[in-house]
Amino acid sequence: MRAEEASYLAGFLDGDGSIHFQLVRQHGYRFGYYIRASLSLSQRTSARSGLEHLQQLIGGGYLRDRGTGMSDLVITSRPLLLSILREVEPYVVFKREHVRRALWLLPQLGSLRDVQEFLRVAREVDAFATLNCSKTKRISVVDVERHLRSMGVLAPVTTSSVALDRGDGSPAEDMVPRHIYESHNTPAPRNRVEV
């Protein structure tokens, strides 16, 4: 992509674009969820030809007509997203932090084999969502943790087997034991579907 094309695309992203990371429920996946990354460029459907031109310029993505008079060019391919974001990074202004964080987060999505690593990245996805003004975020890391506990992948573990006391030697029956969640060494079932 030439510099003037990258700068034009950066301006379009700044004004009428968005970058999203979403936790998506998927029953066949190892952790019951996967992380979808996307970049969307929006325009009135009457000007859809401009999105078609951008689609040819970047070499991918799909066009979606919302039925509201608006259309989107949506890119979900991680390699293409990385390429586009690297190209526009020097030119973005308003979405600079979005691009910076997305460039850091995208390479981590392909190697999530461990439940704790998946949860760490899921927390980053929640943090990324705070950059956007979207009110449609439905699934958070709390939902993923709840699901993993229900599967037996995360289990509460008491941090100490010693009886709690108030510090003066008297027992504290009213004190609630502290729990942390840690993963079992037993892997979750896999259905030949990679995250």
Image (cartoon, grey):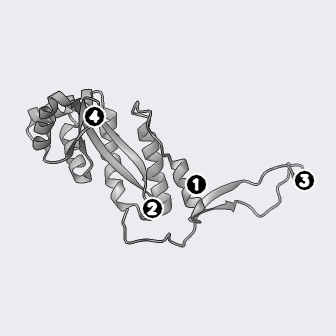
CB within 8 Å, label 4 to label 3: no
In front of the other: label 4 or label 3? 4
In front of the other: label 1 or label 2? 2
Badge 1 density bin: few <14, some 14–19, many ≥20, Cα 10 Å: few
- Residue hosting label 3: 169
Q: Amino acid at mark 4?
A: Gly
CB within 8 Å, label 1 to label 3: no
Residue at 65 percent of width and 56 percent of height: 180
Q: Amino acid at mark 3?
A: Gly
Q: Amino acid at mark 2?
A: His
Q: Secondary structure at mark 2?
A: loop
CA separation, marks 2 and 4?
Answer: 29 Å
Badge 4 density bin: few <14, some 14–19, many ≥20, Cα 10 Å: few
Q: Secondary structure at mark 3?
A: loop
- Residue hosting label 2: 27
- Residue hosting label 4: 67
- Residue hosting label 1: 146
Residue at 39 percent of width and 33 percent of height: 132
Q: Earlier in the sequence, mark 2 or mark 4?
A: 2
Residue at 24 percent of width and 48 percent of height: 82
Looking at the image, residue 133 lies above or below residue 157: above
Q: Quadrant of residue 191?
A: bottom left
Foreground pick, 66 / 132 = 66
Q: Quadrant of residue 150?
A: bottom right
In front of the other: label 4 or label 1? 4
Q: Earlier in the sequence, mark 1 or mark 3?
A: 1
